[in-house]
């Protein structure tokens, strides 16, 4: 009892000020006027030199959005958002830039500080890279715009398109038109519709038939500007037999007010294609009193459109004041497979309502859900998931395991699984456990010389191991560190 | 010479229940003491109080470890100073490989002592050597700590940890429980290999059987929270013959 007591005391006394990415970059920026109207939408579209069809698409979404109401079904509480008090577009002030050297050095420094490599390390002839060290192409999104995308040339050689979506709209309109909004329609939900109207940038990836993308692709999102919403849009298409692994990371400065992040991610896999999408989400979670932090209202969905295709989501969620996020898979193609691996950690006053939807439409489709929720402090951590088998989904299979771990006795873990089966041959399994971090286990570790905090870190890392293993190597190491940092608040 | 461990008039309770009632014990380096006694005499409480388990209230007395106030130290600090408790029921940690746990424990202790951390290859080499001596399958090192281990494997694992961490005071709490005779011999051999001039051991047991294999220098009888009799190794044999009834009466 005493150690848990101690943990609770420490949670109480701790300032969540250990957020390590809370610095602000001082640069001039170019903003849209505050508030949201058709003019705002036109302003953003004009800033991006968009073709008329794109503007029309946005305006339709905007008009639709006006008729919608904010969803209230998630287990999260927050005061209403005043959409007229937000900036919907903010970009670092700069001239067109031709190379990284022309990028504002302050921005370059920001990414260096975050440990994100924007400079491509030139390969010297005859120099062999140490084994295991892989290169990652990065698209860096700063507030509303993409500021740099690395390794473009090399990717181009492989036929892979990896560029800011604003550029793709101009340069590859046919591809964008063909796929944008086909997985998450503009009318999908309140936040996705808002995103469709005002999204400013994000990444676009197209991997042509039969191509295995030669390196990991990564987007790094940074919200810098005050009172600014970030609405990025990501669209990834793996054509027949293609493969790509994509990583996403995010941080924001420490601010007293809440900031809105409403992204949409759409994935499409055609026959025999595979997309692996990994996220390490570390937006500013707010301080120990629950002031500030990011509202992370995100719609992520993948469409296994082709037969034998596969989409795998892996997420490590440690940040944000509120997370509302359900990366999902539509298993349309026969024999297609969806996976969802999640670690969601909540501490302090954080609220997490996250999970997935696996929608089995095709024959012999399979899905797997492994969710690990860890709640500490006075946080609330909810897993919400839906697994459905439609009439034609003969032979559909799902396995779900939801485990929750509680640290202290002021937090909550909730599991809300929905299962709908309309085909009698479908087989769905669901397992769930909730446990408290055991006093005796902690004492055992401490008796061997570990501090209380190290003991919690060790036990938690063991708890989430199944999911960590799904992450690409570099990310797994980062995620492991992040988990320890996130829990520093829970044990002092 | 300063004794390794000196317990004076120790009184402890849990949830208002008095368990230790004026316990005195002195262990010098190089000695192996056996503490025997009936169920409920306070044997496990003594081991937990030495290790600093939360929940026990010390209401009187003191414990000096190499002359220092042990009760003033946090449990992890005691571990770093060289106090090791081999648990009667070792705990399981799912998802954490045994070798990962060993590395975390050893390096945590080394950091606390201001020593450099041991590199993974060096550590692995040492762990493998010890495992070999204890007849531990290297495969076990990769399995999650104690998860799905048999009783014998768990106790061998405790011995492995003890050998790796090289403590000065080893407290073995009912190490024989749940072991068949073969496993008992292996564990006892491991423990005996650790007996040395600078190390003291306290072997807590209900039965004489273990003491056939770990032969103590001194045997104590613990009853109703106090040491009521102390003798040589022959005392254990006598207890085996007579049982604990007389001491229970004496304590009452």
Image: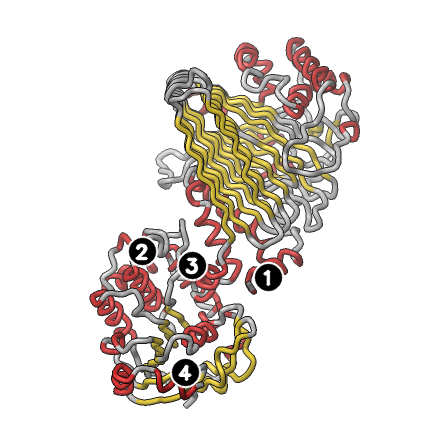
Residue shown at the point (70%, 16%) measured from the top left? A64
Mark 4 and mark 2 on one chain: yes
- Dot 1, crowdedness within 10 Å: few (<14), some or many (≥20)? few
Residue at mark 1: A5
Mark found first going from the N terminus, 3 or 4: 3
Chain letter for the residue marked with disc 2 in the picture: B
Q: Secondary structure at mark 4?
A: strand
Cα separation between marks 4 and 1: 32 Å
Mark seen at residue B104: 3
Q: In what element is the residue under mark 3?
A: helix
Q: How is the image coloured?
A: secondary structure
Q: Position of residue B97 (x, y in %)?
A: 37, 52
Left or right: residue B186 versus residue A293 is left
**In terms of sequence position, does the residue under pointer 4 or pointer 2 come before the other?**
2
State the image quarter where residue B190 is shown. bottom left
Q: Which residue is mark 4?
A: B223
Q: Disc 3 vs disc 1: which is toward the camera? A: 1
Q: State how far apart marks 4 and 2 are (Cα).
A: 33 Å
């Amino acid at each position: 009892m005493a150690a848990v007591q101690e943990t609770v005391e420490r949670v109480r006394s701790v300032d969540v000020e250990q957020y390590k990415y809370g610095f602000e970059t001082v640069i001039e920026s170019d903003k849209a006027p505050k508030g949201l109207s058709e003019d705002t939408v036109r302003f953003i579209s004009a800033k991006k030199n968009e073709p008329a069809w794109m503007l029309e698409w946005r305006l339709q979404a905007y008009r639709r959005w006006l008729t919608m109401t904010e969803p209230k079904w998630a287990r999260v509480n927050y005061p209403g958002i005043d959409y007229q008090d937000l900036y919907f577009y903010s970009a670092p002030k700069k001239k067109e830039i031709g190379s990284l050297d022309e990028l504002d050095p302050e921005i370059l420094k920001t990414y260096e500080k975050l440990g994100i490599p924007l400079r491509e390390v030139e390969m010297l002839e005859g120099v062999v890279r140490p084994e295991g060290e892989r290169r990652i192409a990065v698209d860096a999104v700063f507030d509303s715009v993409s500021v740099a995308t690395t390794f473009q040339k090399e990717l181009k050689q492989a036929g892979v398109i990896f560029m800011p979506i604003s550029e793709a709209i101009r340069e590859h309109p046919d591809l964008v038109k063909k796929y944008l909004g086909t997985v998450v329609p503009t009318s999908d939900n309140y936040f996705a519709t808002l995103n469709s109207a005002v999204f400013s940038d994000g990444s676009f990836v197209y991997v042509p038939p039969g191509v295995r993308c030669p390196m990991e692709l990564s987007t790094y999102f940074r919200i810098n500007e005050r009172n600014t919403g970030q609405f990025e849009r990501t669209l990834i298409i793996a054509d027949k037999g293609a493969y790509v692994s994509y990583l996403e990371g995010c941080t924001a400065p420490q601010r007293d007010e809440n900031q809105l992040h409403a992204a949409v991610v759409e994935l499409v896999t055609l026959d025999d294609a595979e997309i692996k999408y990994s996220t390490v989400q570390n937006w500013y979670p707010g301080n120990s009193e629950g002031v500030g932090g990011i509202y992370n209202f995100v719609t992520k969905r993948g469409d296994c459109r082709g037969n034998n295709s596969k989409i795998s989501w892996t997420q490590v969620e440690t940040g944000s004041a509120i997370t509302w996020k359900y990366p999902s898979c539509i298993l349309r193609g026969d024999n297609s497979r969806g996976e969802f691996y999640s670690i969601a950690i909540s501490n302090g006053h954080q609220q997490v309502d996250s999970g997935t939807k696996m929608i089995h439409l095709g024959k012999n489709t399979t899905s797997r859900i492994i969710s690990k929720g860890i709640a500490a402090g006075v946080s609330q951590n909810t897993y919400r998931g839906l697994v459905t088998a439609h009439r034609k989904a003969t032979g559909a299979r799902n396995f779900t395991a939801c485990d929750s771990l509680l640290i202290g006795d002021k937090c909550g873990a909730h599991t809300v699984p929905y299962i709908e089966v309309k085909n009698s041959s479908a087989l769905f399994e669901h397992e769930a456990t909730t446990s408290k971090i055991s006093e005796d286990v902690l004492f055992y570790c401490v008796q061997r010389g570990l501090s209380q905090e190290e003991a919690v870190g060790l036990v938690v890392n063991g708890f989430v191991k199944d999911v960590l293993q799904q992450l690409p190597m570099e990310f797994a190491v980062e995620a492991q560190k992040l988990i320890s940092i996130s829990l520093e608040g829970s044990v002092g | 010479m300063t004794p390794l461990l000196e317990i004076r008039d120790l009184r402890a309770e849990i949830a208002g229940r008095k368990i230790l009632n004026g316990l005195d014990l002195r262990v010098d380096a190089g000695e192996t003491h056996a503490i025997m006694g009936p169920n409920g005499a306070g044997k496990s409480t003594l081991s937990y109080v030495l290790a600093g388990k939360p929940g026990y209230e010390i209401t009187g007395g003191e414990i000096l470890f190499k002359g220092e106030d042990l009760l003033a130290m946090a449990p992890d600090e005691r571990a770093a100073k060289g106090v090791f408790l081999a648990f009667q029921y070792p705990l399981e940690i799912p998802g954490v490989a045994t070798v990962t746990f060993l590395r975390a424990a050893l390096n945590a202790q080394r950091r606390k002592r201001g020593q450099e951390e041991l590199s993974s290859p060096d550590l692995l080499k040492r762990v493998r050597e010890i495992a070999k001596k204890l007849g531990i399958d290297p495969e076990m090192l990769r399995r999650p700590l104690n998860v799905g281990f048999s009783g014998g494997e768990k106790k061998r694992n405790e011995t492995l940890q003890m050998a790796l961490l090289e403590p000065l005071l080893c407290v073995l709490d009912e190490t024989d429980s749940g072991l068949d005779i073969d496993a008992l011999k292996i564990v006892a051999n491991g423990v005996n290999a650790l007996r040395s001039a600078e190390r003291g051991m306290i072997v807590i047991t209900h039965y004489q059987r273990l003491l056939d294999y770990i032969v103590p220098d001194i045997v104590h009888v613990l009853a109703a929270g106090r040491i009521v009799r102390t003798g040589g190794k022959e005392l254990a044999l006598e207890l085996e013959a007579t049982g604990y009834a007389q001491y229970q009466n004496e304590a009452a």
